[in-house]
Image (tube, rainbow, N blue to C red):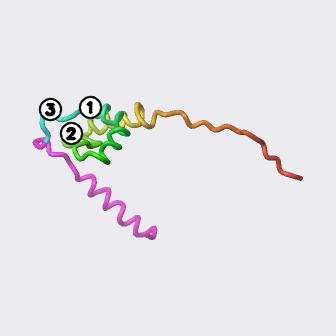
Amino acid sequence: MTIRRITAVLPLMIALAACAQQVKSAVAPAAPGFLLGVWHGFIFPVAWVLSLFMDDVAIYAVPNNGGWYDFGYFLGIVVFGVGARKTHTVTRTRIIRERR
């Protein structure tokens, strides 16, 4: 796409996405909230692998109570789950010098 098309379509897509709302009457009072969102985010890798082989396992709870569940899910993945791994270390084994 050209820059003109992107600048024309992007604001329309953002405006359309801003209209999306969760209907309060469609959410049960016992729907998963923040704490279950954190838990589901934390167990995401295991749930994802299981969801590939089992139809009754999902990686995201539907219906949930909306923004607080999403925030908990995000925290579960990034802070406590997959994103919290600090095992990537870079070591330098040799120095390459340029010839002059």
Give SS at disc 3.
Answer: loop
Amino acid type, mark 3: Ala
Front-most of residues 91 and 47: 47
Q: Which residue is mark 1?
A: 36
Residues at discs 2 and 1 in contact (Cβ within 8 Å): yes
Q: Is residue 8 magenta?
A: yes
Local packing at callout 1 (Cα closer than 10 Å; few below 14, some 14-19, many 20+) is: some
Picture coordinates of residue 31 (x, y %)? 17, 35
Q: Tell me which secondary structure the magenta stretch mostly adopts.
A: helix
**29 over 1 or under it: above or below:** above
Q: Give the quarter of the image for residue 13.
A: bottom left
- The alpha-carbon separation of the residues under discs 2 and 1 comes to 9 Å
- The alpha-carbon separation of the residues under discs 1 and 3 comes to 11 Å
Q: Which residue is mark 2?
A: 64
Residue range highlighted in magenta: 1-26
Amino acid type, mark 1: Leu
Residues at discs 1 and 3 in contact (Cβ within 8 Å): no
Q: Which residue is mark 3?
A: 30
| Sequence-first disc among 2 and 3 | 3
Horizontally, residue 98 falls left or right of residue 41, namely: right
Picture coordinates of residue 91 (x, y %)? 67, 37
Give SS at disc 2.
Answer: loop
Front-most of residues 1 and 4: 1
Horizontally, residue 37 falls left or right of residue 31, namely: right
Give SS at disc 1.
Answer: helix
Picture coordinates of residue 24 (x, y %)? 14, 41
**57 over 75 or under it: above or below:** below
- Residue at (26%, 31%) from the top-left corner? 36
- Residue at (45%, 70%) from the top-left corner? 2
Amino acid type, mark 2: Asn
Picture coordinates of residue 18 (x, y %)? 27, 52
| Sequence-first disc among 2 and 1 | 1
